Image: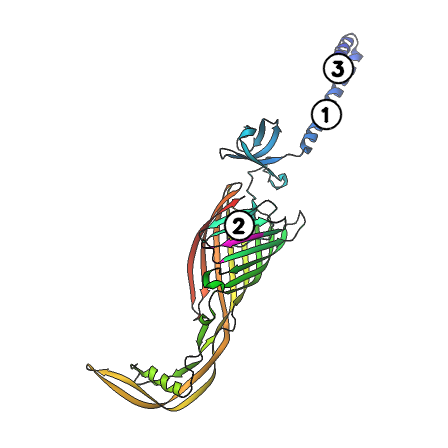
């Protein structure tokens, strides 16, 4: 630099004596200026190509900062944040530094990165169902809800295992999900999942259930939509409680359009004497009730640290009922009934032909159950979230009537 100054001074003195030298001097200065500008541009381009490293830094006092690490001298870290600019953080105050993939940080119009949206392991699920995105290794998480706790572990970047239970540990279930690898630039993901459950010490461990499904997800962890299809089954009852009705029903005599005490029991006794097994029950042919399952779910950001979740499942099962297969007339059935009038009772004896209908189990339609779970998730920090759902159930009962009821609930998510 000093040598360049001496050359410029000598040229200046020469220019004072010769006009042509002045022209040469000006051209020389312009050449130096252009070369300096080019050098500065080259230096700027080199700096722009340097890969920036973004981190989530958590301090011992609970404070968290997200930004680009400018320098780290071993004693303190210089972090460039969007909200408060450059800050120095003493290394001894840092609990953890989690690196963030810079390619996932969105850019604002002025080129500055926007606030980082949490992409923890629990973004692989909605309120109840999961999407096809994988839980990456070491991204384990737990969820605590009003119904009970559950824990999910990442075996590797594609396979995760989990345990789900109520607060009394019955029922208890094991869950697994395998996410298929997809290209890094692809936003379409596929996964297979299963849940196997036992009633535990309830029902003397005779109850069981399961659900197996496939999921396709379009989008990333911040915003996505998923479609699922599978099969579910459950047996949460004893065999003798799975009755759908009796095998025989009698058509009782109609006397003046009134009901009289003892009429039905008297007829039933006479029919049993004729060999009618009047109390024989018909049970559902399936020990475990099964149904097809369809699901649609999605999540989208609605603020810096909040997301809206829509989670819905439809269970489409078979409804079993009674189908009439035979009608038989039993002639001359003697029966009796009691008539009360003016404080006195009179026993009436009569004889009639009684028709008995015989039934069997049959499929009489579908039995849908729809669970809708709209929810809001609040990302309290990088590894913590809280969510609340105003869930509701719409179902068809055994008599074909539609029933519905709300099931509001909340849950807490933690990474560990």
Q: Earlier in the sequence, mark 2 or mark 3?
A: 3
User: Element type at marker 2?
Assistant: strand
Q: Earlier in the sequence, mark 3 or mark 1?
A: 3
Spatial separation of the CA atoms under disc 2 and disc 1: 56 Å
Q: Which residues are magenta?
A: 161-171
Can you say whether 242 is above or below 97 in the image? below
168 magenta-colored: yes
Query: What kind of colouring is applied to the model shown?
Result: rainbow
Residue 407 image offset from top left, x and y in percent = 43, 56
Residue 107 image offset from top left, x and y in percent = 60, 38
Q: Earlier in the sequence, mark 2 or mark 1?
A: 1
Q: Residue at x 57, y 49 (%)?
A: 153
In the rendered structure, the answer to whether residue 190 lies left or right of residue 32 reads: left
Q: Give the number of the mark in front: 2 or 3.
A: 2
Residue 221 image offset from top left, x and y in percent = 58, 47
Q: Nearer the viewer, residue 207 or 123?
A: 207
Mark 2 is surrounded, within 10 Å at the Cα level, by few (under 14), some (14 to 19) or many (20 or more) other residues, namely many
User: Element type at marker 1?
Assistant: helix
Give the numbered dot on residue 4: 3
Give the numbered dot on residue 39: 1
Residue 98 image offset from top left, x and y in percent = 58, 38
Q: Residue furthest left?
A: 342
Give the numbered dot on residue 151: 2
Disc 2, disc 3: CB below 8 Å? no
Mark 3 is surrounded, within 10 Å at the Cα level, by few (under 14), some (14 to 19) or many (20 or more) other residues, namely few
- Mark count: 3
Spatial separation of the CA atoms under disc 3 and disc 1: 16 Å
165 magenta-colored: yes
Spatial separation of the CA atoms under disc 2 and disc 3: 70 Å
């Amino acid at each position: 630099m000093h040598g360049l100054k001496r050359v410029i001074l000598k040229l200046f003195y020469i220019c004072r004596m010769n006009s042509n030298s002045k022209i040469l001097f000006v051209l020389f200065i312009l050449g130096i200026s252009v070369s300096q500008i080019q050098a500065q541009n080259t230096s700027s381009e080199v700096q722009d190509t340097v890969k920036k490293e973004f981190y989530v830094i958590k301090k011992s006092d609970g404070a968290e900062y997200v930004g680009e690490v400018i320098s780290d001298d071993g004693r303190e870290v210089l972090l460039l944040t969007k909200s408060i600019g450059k800050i120095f953080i003493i290394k001894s105050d840092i609990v953890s530094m989690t690196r963030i993939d810079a390619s996932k940080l969105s850019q604002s119009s002025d080129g500055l990165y926007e606030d980082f949206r949490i992409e923890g392991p629990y973004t692989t699920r909605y309120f109840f169902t999961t999407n096809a995105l994988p839980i990456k290794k070491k991204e384990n998480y737990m969820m605590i809800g009003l119904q009970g706790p559950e824990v999910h572990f990442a075996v590797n970047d594609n396979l995760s295992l989990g345990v789900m239970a109520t607060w009394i540990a019955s029922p208890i279930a094991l869950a697994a999900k395998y996410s298929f690898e997809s290209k890094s630039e692809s936003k379409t993901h596929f996964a297979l999942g299963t849940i196997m459950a036992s009633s535990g010490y309830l029902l003397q461990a005779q109850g069981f259930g399961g659900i197996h499904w496939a999921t396709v997800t379009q989008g990333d962890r911040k915003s996505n939509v998923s479609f699922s299809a599978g099969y579910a089954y459950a047996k949460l009852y004893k065999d003798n409680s799975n009755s759908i009705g009796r095998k025989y029903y009698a058509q009782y005599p109609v006397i003046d359009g009134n009901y009289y005490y003892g009429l039905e029991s008297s007829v039933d006794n006479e029919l049993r004497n004729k060999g009618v097994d009047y109390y024989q029950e018909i049970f559902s042919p399936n020990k475990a009730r099964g149904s097809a399952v369809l699901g649609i779910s999605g999540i989208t950001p609605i603020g810096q640290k909040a997301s809206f979740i829509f989670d819905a499942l439809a269970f489409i099962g078979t409804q079993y009922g009674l189908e009439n297969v035979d009608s038989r007339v039993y002639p001359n059935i003697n029966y009796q009934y009691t008539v009360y009038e003016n404080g006195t009772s009179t026993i009436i004896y009569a004889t009639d032909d009684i028709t008995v209908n015989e039934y069997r189990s049959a499929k009489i339609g579908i039995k849908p159950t729809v669970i809708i779970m709209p929810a809001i998730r609040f990302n309290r920090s990088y590894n913590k979230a809280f969510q609340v759902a105003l869930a509701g159930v719409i179902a068809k009962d055994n008599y074909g009537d539609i029933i519905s009821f709300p099931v509001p609930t909340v849950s807490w998510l933690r990474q560990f």
